[in-house]
């Protein structure tokens, strides 16, 4: 039995666009790199989890003044 390769008809047709793509104004393309200690990173992850947010959303909300206390 041959393995690998593309199955006939598999996947999206060539040139088609995803129907789930967000409008340009809602896309999150910005990137910020943050340097911190491993202990600080662990604390940030812990606080984000307690607040029910992703780390990214937690940090953005904290920096922009949204309530982040968990």
Image (tube, rainbow, N blue to C red):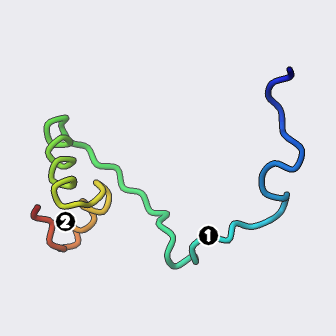
Which residue is outermost to the front?
1
Residue 68's label in the rendered image is none
Distance between the alpha carbons at the discs numbered 2 and 1: 28 Å
Say which quarter of the image contains residue 35.
top left
In the picture of the structure, the residue carrying the numbered disc 2 is 62
Residue 21's label in the rendered image is 1
Front-lying residue, 26 or 31: 26
Q: Does residue 38 sit above or below 30 in this rendering?
A: above
Q: Is residue 2 left or right of residue 48?
A: right
Which residue is outermost to the left?
69
Front-lying residue, 47 or 8: 8
- Residue 18 placed where, x, y %? 69, 66
Q: Secondary structure at mark 1?
A: loop
Mark 2 crowdedness (10 Å alpha carbons): few <14, some 14-19, many ≥20: few
Q: Please report the residue visible at 30 percent of the width from the left and 57 percent of the height from the top.
A: 54
Front-lying residue, 22 or 63: 22
Q: Please report the residue visible at 86 percent of the width from the left and 22 percent of the height from the top.
A: 2
Please state, as top left, top right, bottom left or bottom right, where the C terminus lies in the image: bottom left
Say which quarter of the image contains residue 61.
bottom left
Which residue is outermost to the right?
8
- Residue 1 placed where, x, y %? 86, 20
Labelled pair 2, 1 in contact (Cβ < 8 Å): no
- Residue 9 placed where, x, y %? 87, 50
Closer to the chain start, of discs 2 and 1, is 1
Q: Is residue 54 left or right of residue 2?
A: left
Q: Does residue 48 sit above or below 18 in this rendering?
A: above
Q: Secondary structure at mark 2?
A: helix
- Residue 20 placed where, x, y %? 62, 69
Q: Please report the residue visible at 21 percent of the width from the left and 53 percent of the height from the top.
A: 49
């Amino acid at each position: 039995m041959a393995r690998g390769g593309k199955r006939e008809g598999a996947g999206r047709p060539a040139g088609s666009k995803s129907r789930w793509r967000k409008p340009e104004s809602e896309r999150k393309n910005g990137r910020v790199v943050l340097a911190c200690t491993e202990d600080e990173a662990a604390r940030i992850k812990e606080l984000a989890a307690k607040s029910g947010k992703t780390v990214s959303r937690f940090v953005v909300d904290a920096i922009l003044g949204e309530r982040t206390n968990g």
